[in-house]
Image (tube, rainbow, N blue to C red):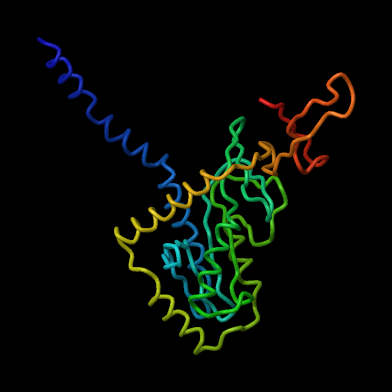
Amino acid sequence: MDIFDVLFDVLEQVWYVVPLLIIFSIFKSRWFKGVLGEFLVNHLLLKLPQSDYTLIKDVTLPTEDGTTQIDHVVVSKFGIFVVETKNMKGWIFGSARQKQWTQKIYRHTSKFQNPLHQNYKHVKTLESLLDCSGEQLHSVIVFIGESTFKTEMPPNVTYARGCIRYIQQFDEVVFSDDEYSRLIELLNKIKLKRGIATNLKHRQHVRKIVADKESKESIKLCPRCGSEMLMRETKRGENKGKQFWGCSTFPKCRMVKQLS
């Protein structure tokens, strides 16, 4: 029996491992987490009274420099709610003004774009295309998964069911019945048709944005709270005059890093 016969016999015995590994890798992928998060939020938003709220999901809109993709848009007589979904776990640190937020899982720390900033472009695009005022549109960020906010978040950044409570707190009618119908019809008309071509165009646009950001000088961020790190200098002691990186929120955060 040669080596090929041995390999064939082994594969016959463990053939089922390969599809299991493929399925496992899909479940662990960022793509699947995103799809699952959007599915769960979609299920939640459908609980809103359909007489007053209309959910439009997976909306890709044209912009001056490409496209922008919105997870969910809820059109109602009380305003338009632009919903961004984050399926994440661990501790989440961030504030409204920070460019990047921090995710911490045990000793592992990573950065991600401030979802409020990410959703701002979505809101402004809809404001322009639907010819609405800024007061009639509301940004909503929904975290799905086993995540915990470790810093105080704005009221429009919520966990799961919190998005329903946030949306329903707006109870003043800002659109007439005719305007409400017109907005739904217009949004369905201007959104790009779902498909491979639309997704490819959007991904190319996203890659360009990322490349442009990486080409610029990056700001050093605090690994503990995500705030900007500043160059500081020791004022006293044996290390007087020595420079180091210190968190800009000191003394609230006392994180320091020595110069490499």
- Residue 188 rendering spot, x and y as whole percentages: 40, 75
Q: Is residue 99 left or right of residue 48?
A: right
Q: Quadrant of the N terminus?
A: top left
- Residue 218 rendering spot, x and y as whole percentages: 60, 42
Q: In front here: 12 or 258?
A: 258
- Residue 124 rendering spot, x and y as whole percentages: 55, 69
In the rendered view, would you say 141 is above or below 7? below
Question: For residue 97, what is the image quadrant?
Answer: bottom right
Residue at the limit of the structure toward the top, as seen here: 1
Q: Is residue 38 left or right of residue 250?
A: left
Residue at x 79%, y 25% (from the top left corner): 242
In the rendered view, would you say 11 is above or below 116? above
Q: Is residue 63 left or right of residue 161?
A: left
Question: For residue 39, what is the image quadrant?
Answer: bottom left
- Residue 145 rendering spot, x and y as whole percentages: 54, 47
Residue at x 78%, y 43% (from the top left corner): 249
In the rendered view, would you say 202 is above or below 193? above
Residue at x 75%, y 36% (from the top left corner): 231
Q: Quadrant of the C terminus?
A: top right
